[in-house]
Amino acid sequence: MTLDDRKKRILESIIRDYVETAEPVGSRAMVRKHALRISAATVRNEMADLEEMGYLEQPHTSAGRIPSEKGFRYYVDCMMEKELPGDEEVEMLQQAISGNQDDWNNLVQNIARFIAQVTNYAAFVIVPSVKISQFQYMQIVPLQDNQALMVLVTDVGIIMHRKISIPASVTKEDLQCISEAFTGVFKGKNLVDMSRSDLQSIRDKMVRRRKVMDMVLEALHVLIEGSSEEKVVISGALNILNEPEFKDTEKIKKILSILAQDGTLKEVIPEQIRDDVDIRIGQENNIQDIKEMSLVYAGYRMSGDMGKIGLIGPVRMEYWKAVGTVESVKDIIEKIIRDRF
């Protein structure tokens, strides 16, 4: 049902006030706060109409009104204007990702931490499994402080990075020699099909550089193993403790349990996900233990697969800010992926 402008303004005012205070909203307070050019009696009549339509609820007979889930849904679908991160928050995000783009794990963790920090909800980033194809080449680049960056590139453009420690005596030429040895033996082969004999033959040729070779082989094993399944990163789970809706200990335990288990969290987030930001409010969720929560989430493209990014918070959520933040960060992730891959 379409609401007239006055009902829309009243519904929005109630939603904004309820999100801010977590308390039922009364007609007199709303008229004063929002400078409505109508009487409190008129506002009460409009509120009664909105309640009859299912957009508002009255928790107690003498109390004001709160938005229903239907009211929140109408607001986000038909009225809401998303709020993009401000200049200060954009600067925070730039600091979070600067200097980390060669270390994908740290980058993802910093992005999740940023989203949780600016929204005060629990944030998640799910990185899709990498479908490894044929090995093309390896490059080991020296860094500072006795470290090097090992870079693997496959025929479908997938790039994987991992930092390794190297002895101070190892030169740039040593690292180049190891890179060329790996590329020569494995070019065109599937990474998961690397044979022990192939690996041993390289190690035998690199007697003087065997210590570095062992570090490279260990890092290679970690990369291959880690790329075969989705990675789930969660930040800000304890932000839920700050919400007055979740003072019940048992309720908190259930929610934190979901956030603590990768598999359960994956079940909470819909499998079919779009590039655009979606919202699931309360009872729209498919897991009983989060039917008092809301999800704001979107998909991002990574080498043909779909990763997921989003927020979990109370139904009484700042949807306008949550949607703007998720959308902005999703676009930044996809830009980083395009630049790297």
Image: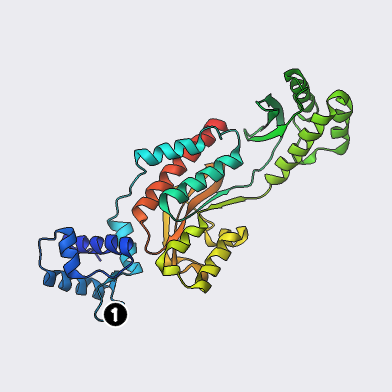
Tell me: 175 left or right of 313: right
Q: Nearer the viewer, residue 328 or 70?
A: 328
Q: Nearer the viewer, residue 261 or 224?
A: 261
Tell me: 158 left or right of 18: right
Picture coordinates of residue 325, whole percent (x, y): 40, 47
Which residue is pictured at 53% across the width and 73% down the height? 250
Looking at the rendered structure, the secondary structure element under dot 1 is loop
Tell me: 286 left or right of 199: left
338 versus 21 height, above or below: above
Identify the residue position indicated by label 1 in the image. 60
> Where the C terminus falls, by quadrant?
top right
Q: Amino acid at mark 1?
A: His
Which residue is pictured at 68% across the width and 40% down the height? 132
Which residue is pictured at 25% across the width and 68% down the height? 25
172 versus 230 height, above or below: above
The answer to whether one can see residue 283 in this image is no
Q: Quadrant of residue 10?
A: bottom left
Q: Residues within 10 Å of mark 1 (few under 14, many from 20)?
A: few
Which residue is pictured at 60% across the width and 42% down the height? 105
Tell me: 93 left or right of 232: left
The residue sitting at the top extreme is 173
The answer to whether one can see residue 327 in this image is yes
